[in-house]
């Protein structure tokens, strides 16, 4: 059973017909050139989907977001049917792994050509059991942007899933330096945003809340699925502008993302938080069982 599977898109954007939408290649063989703008400038977008039993999860939601991110970067529109075909083919070859993921990468391509590059890499997932059951320690870090950065400074591409994740990874290293596992970003004016690779959920009584997507954060596919799950259990859900005081008022918090799914928050800035193991277990079982 392969541990990694790679498909290179032959026609990643619309209007570029090719007889085969992708070709499967050796994941250890060189594929990219050093002139690709995805490498030299982080100029591109990506998506990561969970894979269960060889089926990629929330494919439509991820492809819609890929297209939205590409539009925010003025990239040619991705050919969603080609990306879907490559995703299904790669995910299907990972069927024997209990948990896997696929990463779709779409770059501006080799400088000067105007032709985007695209590939789908599938891999087995690391074991996230500890984060899902014992919880994660989180530190609050200032993102350095106001809560209205998306509308006031759209060129900062807040809310697009770009390849420029060096800042997000630096924030994660800062969390580790502080003895924590993850980061909760807040705006300079004190509004809760998201993690570097996760959305946040707050449970207040029978309400499940998440920060509004208008705040320049990524519209999370896992958060959206968690909202559907909560509503099916009779809870109400809402997108809100939440200050730091909302953290103290919440009964429980989670970081949610594709692949890791729901990680309950065990502490914030060293202060222990109550967790909700029953809700967490049910939510993770639901997220793991997705097959669409
Ligand atoms: N926010 C950011 C900044 C992310 O990078 C991610 C995922 O990588 C998420 C939220 C969660 O998104 P999803 O649930 O669609 O994986």
Image (tube, rainbow, N blue to C red):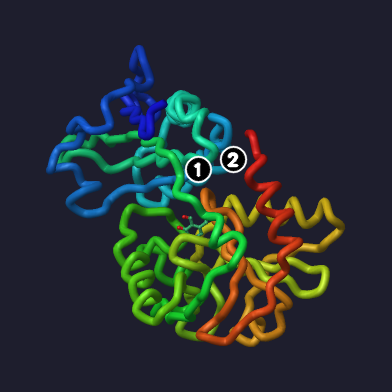
**Relative to 50, does residue 247 appear above or below in the rendering?**
below
Residue at horizontal 38 percent and vertical 20 percent from the top: 21
**Relative to 120, does residue 260 appear above or below in the rendering?**
below
Number of other residues with Cα within 10 Å of mark 2, as a class: few under 14, some 14 to 19, many 20 or more: some
Residue at horizontal 61 percent and vertical 58 percent from the top: 262
Q: Quadrant of residue 134?
A: bottom right
Residue at horizontal 40 percent and vertical 36 percent from the top: 122
Q: Position of residue 9 (x, y in %)?
A: 33, 27
Residue at horizontal 51 percent and vertical 85 percent from the top: 269
| Front-lying residue, 106 or 170 | 170
| Front-lying residue, 11 or 236 | 236
Q: Position of residue 117 (x, y in %)?
A: 28, 35
Q: Are marks 2 and 1 in contact (CB under 8 Å)?
A: yes
Pointer 2 residue: 58
Mark 2 vs mark 1: which is more N-terminal?
1
Q: Quadrant of residue 133?
A: bottom right
Q: Secondary structure at mark 2?
A: loop
Report the residue that reaches farthest toward the right.
234
Q: Is mark 1 within 8 Å of ligand 1?
A: yes
Q: Secondary structure at mark 1?
A: strand
Q: Position of residue 183 (x, y in %)?
A: 46, 73
Pointer 1 residue: 49
Q: Is mark 2 within 8 Å of ligand 1?
A: yes
**Relative to 151, does residue 50 appear above or below in the rendering?**
above
Number of other residues with Cα within 10 Å of mark 1, as a class: few under 14, some 14 to 19, many 20 or more: many
């Amino acid at each position: 059973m392969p541990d990694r599977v790679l498909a290179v898109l032959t026609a990643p954007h619309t209007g570029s017909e090719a007889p085969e939408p992708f070709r499967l290649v050796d994941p250890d063989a060189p594929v990219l050139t050093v002139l690709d703008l995805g490498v030299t400038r982080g100029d591109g977008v990506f998506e990561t989907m969970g894979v269960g039993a060889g089926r990629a999860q929330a494919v439509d939601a991820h492809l819609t977001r890929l297209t939205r991110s590409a539009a925010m970067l003025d990239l040619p529109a991705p050919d969603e049917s080609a990306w879907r075909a490559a995703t299904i083919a790669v995910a299907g070859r990972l069927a024997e792994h209990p948990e896997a993921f696929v990463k779709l990468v779409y770059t501006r391509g080799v400088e000067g050509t105007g032709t985007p590059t695209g590939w789908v890499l599938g891999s087995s997932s690391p074991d996230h059991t500890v984060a899902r059951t014992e919880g994660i320690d989180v530190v609050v870090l200032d993102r350095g942007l106001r809560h209205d950065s998306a509308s006031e400074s759209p060129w900062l591409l807040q809310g697009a899933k770009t390849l420029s994740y060096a800042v997000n990874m630096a924030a994660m290293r800062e969390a580790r330096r502080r003895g924590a596992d993850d980061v909760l970003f807040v705006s300079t004016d004190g509004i809760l945003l998201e993690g570097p690779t996760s959305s946040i959920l707050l449970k207040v009584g029978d309400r499940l809340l998440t920060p509004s997507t208008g705040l320049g954060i990524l519209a999370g596919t896992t958060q959206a699925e968690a909202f559907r799950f909560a509503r099916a259990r009779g809870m109400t859900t809402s997108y809100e502008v939440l200050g730091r005081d909302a953290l103290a008022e919440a009964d429980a918090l989670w970081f949610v993302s594709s692949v890791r799914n729901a990680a309950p928050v065990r502490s914030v800035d060293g202060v222990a938080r109550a967790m909700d193991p029953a809700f967490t277990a049910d939510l993770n079982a639901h997220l793991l069982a997705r097959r669409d």
